[in-house]
Amino acid sequence: MFETIDDLDDQQRLLMRIDVNAPVDDGEVQDNRRFVRHAETISELLANDHAIALMAHQGRPGRDTFVTLEQHADILADHVGESVEYVPSTYGEEALDAIDDLESGDVILLENVRMTDEELADLTPEEHGETEFVQTLAPEFDAYVNDGYSVAHRAHTSIVGFPQVMDSYAGRVMADEYEYNTSVERREFDGKVTMVLGGTKAEDVIAAMEHLDEKVDQFLLGGIVGHLFQRANGYEIGRDTPEGPGGLYDDNWEANEETIREVIDEYGDRISLPVDVAREDENGERVTDRMESLQGGPDEYMDIGEATIDAYRPHVEESEAVLVKGALGVFEIEEFSYGTRGVLQAVADTDCFSVVGGGDTSRSVEMYDIGTEHFNHLSIAGGAYLKALTGEPLAAIEALEK
Ligand SMILES: Nc1ncnc2c1ncn2[C@@H]1O[C@H](COP(=O)(O)OP(=O)(O)OP(=O)(O)O)[C@@H](O)[C@H]1O
Ligand SMILES: O=C(O)[C@H](O)COP(=O)(O)O
């Protein structure tokens, strides 16, 4: 087991990893529950007079969402109610100067760690610990705290490198999510277990499906994941999104199709797919097409249709546990929120054990007033949550335990 911030002495100089990776709309970083949850940990640490330098990432190199953390510092400051200084360097001179000036009660946010050469390098945890990034920053601090549960599945320098050489502790979000999500994996249900899978990170979701067959009785698919499955069935649907991993439908299609075929052959009878999908017509209105008579281009479908929602609802009502990962449509636009809202409302109306995961997806519960109290747990994690459900070890946890 790992140590947590409860084990820290007061007034320490802390290097802390958080995960405020967020959707970026027209260059504007969107606030979400990750900021709120990490702000709670930061406030708790400030109450004990620590000085904190935060590390975080945003997007992946080459994507539109790969931006600096300037806006993140402002959003965090709003939630913490204290100033959070953005430092436009991760471990260069400017960063070291700002760290030098850090006093008890101060918080700074260092530049996007994915802008360093090391962060995403293919290295062992021990090698990450030997990088210039780690060797430069580690001596400046008393301890390392990792609160970034939602990025805990990535074996990157800021996650696995620092614990090699520093006293390391799990933050509040890390500890809570870990306990909850592993208890989901261990928990045995007598009744039906249903998993609702959607969103844009389709390859991660499909990879997880390969490991979930014994734990799940029914899969309900939507979002880009649903498109991919229906495309494998011969329908002209689906597109690559700038936020998604890219290449889903071209370079990686052959491999994706093969995996989907394997999953369908193995337990296709437990997988429900959209029978209709919704798009915007020329007047800007929502219009729904049956799967056999698609009218839009492959890239135009933004939600599951009403018949699909009606078909999915009884599965939820019959379930003892429902686990959700990823949205069934572009819920951020009201017209295309029907699928996500319809299924989440069915979960809220049912007395089942329920977990909603996915940093973006769990936001829809609050956005549409579905009532957080109707769910057992709203996870701010996506990929890490999926991995935890499949019982796979998380790189960050292994590093903290070491
Ligand atoms: N048909 C669709 N076309 C385009 N985007 C879609 C579609 N259906 C769902 N989405 C998008 O999926 C997103 C949510 O899923 P995504 O896989 O990106 O993240 P998540 O599961 O919430 O969390 P995380 O980012 O933490 O893994 C929403 O922002 C929604 O707009
Ligand atoms: O949003 C997430 O799921 C995490 O921040 C991890 O981001 P990544 O999938 O780009 O590594």
Image (spheres, grey):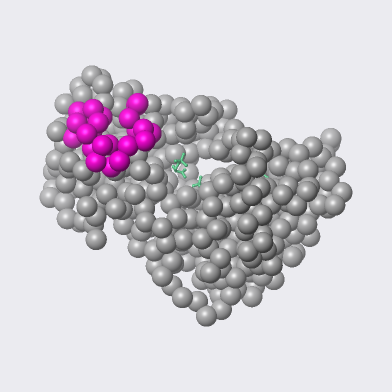
Residue 134 horizontal side relative to residue 281, left or right: left
Residue 314 horizontal side relative to residue 61, left or right: right
Query: Looking at the figure, which quarter contains the N terminus?
Result: bottom left
Stretch in magenta:
116-138
| Nearer to the camera, 254 or 232 | 254
**Residue 119 can be seen, yes or no:** yes
**Residue 367 drawn above or below residue 298:** below
Instruction: Give me the residue at 47% from left, 34% from top.
Output: 59
Q: Is residue 49 magenta?
A: no
Percent coordinates x, y for residue 317 in the rendering: 64, 73
Q: Quadrant of ligand 2?
A: top left
Percent coordinates x, y for residue 17 in the rendering: 31, 41
**Residue 125 drawn above or below residue 377:** above
How many circles with numbers are drawn on the protein? 0
**Residue 289 drawn above or below residue 194:** above
| The image quarter in which residue 115 lies | top left
Residue 313 horizontal side relative to residue 259, left or right: right
**Residue 193 drawn above or below residue 246:** below
Percent coordinates x, y for residue 364 in the rendering: 57, 51
**Residue 81 can be seen, yes or no:** no
Instruction: Give me the residue at 16% from left, 36% from top.
Output: 141
| Nearer to the camera, 305 or 227 | 227
Instruction: Give me the residue at 35% from left, 39% from top.
Output: 156
Percent coordinates x, y for residue 41 in the rendering: 30, 49
| Nearer to the camera, 41 or 150 | 150
Instruction: Give me the residue at 53% from left, 29% from top.
Output: 63
Q: Is residue 127 magenta?
A: yes
